[in-house]
Image: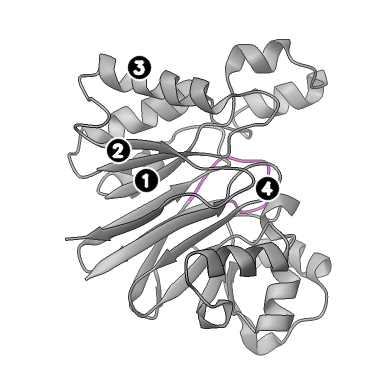
């Protein structure tokens, strides 16, 4: 019994993640064009018509821009909280109401044979969530677009086999970069994004529980980060804590504009 994961895109240009068991296939966010998502799924030998549902982390454009197309053209169901749907609905156009599954509170969802767990995070959206996916004894977590690291986040992901965690920016690059001051303040605030150092802290805390063997860095800024810098910052933090990437776990990157590695988690 296994779970599979692949990042189809992760960054401010658009976000879409693929999580699947042998029987159930899910997307987290649909922030790229429908064409891109369809072709990216084909790259990993998945037919878009076989996807069983889409979950949204929040309503920002880089997470929903392809949603209307996926629901209208490919009839993909959407699972979304009531507050998020209220702000998403006007942006996606007319859709078949039979594809819509709205719930008004945080709750565990069973979609096919995958249990979906969620937790609220701190971000400048109406009802932002992170997700964990469990099938049998395998568990995968996705945590991007959050400004602070809460105990609830750690609790949600402590027993994940694979964790995708945001490493959005290098703090000094952001502070000295060309972004306007209001945007810098937003990113650095508790409702913004995690830095490379924050990602390293989360990874270090999660590894204390002894479950996680794959850590993927996500949502890297094009303007305020470099992939090598994010990787080396997190690796340094882990090594200082006594965890050696490549031996104790796999540390890897996701990408803004291309499909990442395909992972299959089996216990």
Work out whether 266 lies above or below 62: below
The one nearer the camera, 37 or 145, is 37
Q: Is residue 154 left or right of residue 57?
A: left
- SS category of the residue bearing label 1: strand
Task: Identify residue for label 4.
Answer: 125
Q: Residue 250's mark? A: 2
Q: Is residue 245 left or right of residue 50?
A: left
Mark 3 and mark 2: span between their CA atoms? 14 Å
Mark 3 and mark 4: span between their CA atoms? 32 Å
Mark 1 and mark 4: span between their CA atoms? 22 Å
Residue 60 placed where, x, y %? 72, 51
Mark 2 and mark 4: span between their CA atoms? 31 Å
Which residue is pictured at 22% across the width and 25% down the height?
A: 243
Q: Residue 163's mark? A: 1
Q: Contact (CB < 8 A) between labels 2 and 4?
A: no
Give the number of the mark in front: 2 or 1.
2
- SS category of the residue bearing label 4: loop
Residue 129 placed where, x, y %? 53, 53
Give the number of the mark in front: 3 or 4.
3
Q: Earlier in the sequence, mark 3 or mark 2?
A: 3
Residue 252 placed where, x, y %? 40, 37
Give the residues drawn in magenta, as a range: 120-128
Residue 125 placed where, x, y %? 68, 47
Q: Is residue 196 left or right of residue 156?
A: right
Q: Contact (CB < 8 A) between labels 1 and 4?
A: no
Looking at the rendering, which quadrant does residue 136 occupy?
Answer: bottom left
- SS category of the residue bearing label 2: strand
Q: Earlier in the sequence, mark 2 or mark 4?
A: 4
- SS category of the residue bearing label 3: helix
Which quarter of the figure is the N terminus placed in? Answer: bottom left
Q: Earlier in the sequence, mark 1 or mark 3?
A: 1
Which residue is pictured at 74% across the width and 15% down the height?
A: 177
């Amino acid at each position: 019994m296994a779970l599979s994961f692949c990042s189809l895109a992760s960054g401010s240009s658009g976000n879409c993640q693929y999580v699947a068991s042998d029987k159930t296939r899910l997307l987290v966010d649909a922030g790229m064009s429908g064409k891109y998502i369809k072709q990216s799924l084909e790259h990993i030998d998945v037919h878009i018509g076989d996807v069983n549902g889409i979950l949204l982390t929040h309503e920002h454009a880089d997470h929903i821009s392809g949603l209307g197309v996926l629901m209208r053209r490919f009839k993909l169901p959407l699972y979304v909280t009531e507050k998020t749907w209220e702000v998403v609905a006007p942006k996606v156009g007319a859709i078949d109401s039979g594809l819509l599954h709205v719930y008004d509170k945080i709750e565990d969802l069973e979609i096919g044979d995958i249990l979906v767990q969620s937790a609220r995070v701190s971000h400048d959206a109406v009802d932002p969530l992170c997700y964990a996916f469990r099938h049998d004894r395998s568990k995968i977590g996705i945590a991007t677009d959050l400004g602070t690291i809460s105990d609830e986040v750690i609790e949600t992901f402590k027993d994940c086999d694979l964790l995708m965690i945001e490493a959005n920016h290098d703090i000094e690059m952001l502070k000295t970069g060309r972004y306007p001051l209001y945007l810098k303040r937003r990113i650095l605030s508790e409702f913004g994004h995690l830095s490379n150092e924050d990602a390293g802290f989360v990874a270090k805390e999660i590894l204390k529980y002894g479950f996680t063997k794959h850590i993927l860095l996500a949502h890297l800024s094009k303007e305020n980060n470099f992939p090598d810098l994010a990787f080396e910052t997190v690796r340094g933090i882990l090594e200082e804590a006594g965890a050696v990437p490549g031996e104790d776990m796999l540390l890897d990157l996701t990408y803004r504009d291309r499909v990442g590695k395909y992972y299959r988690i089996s216990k």
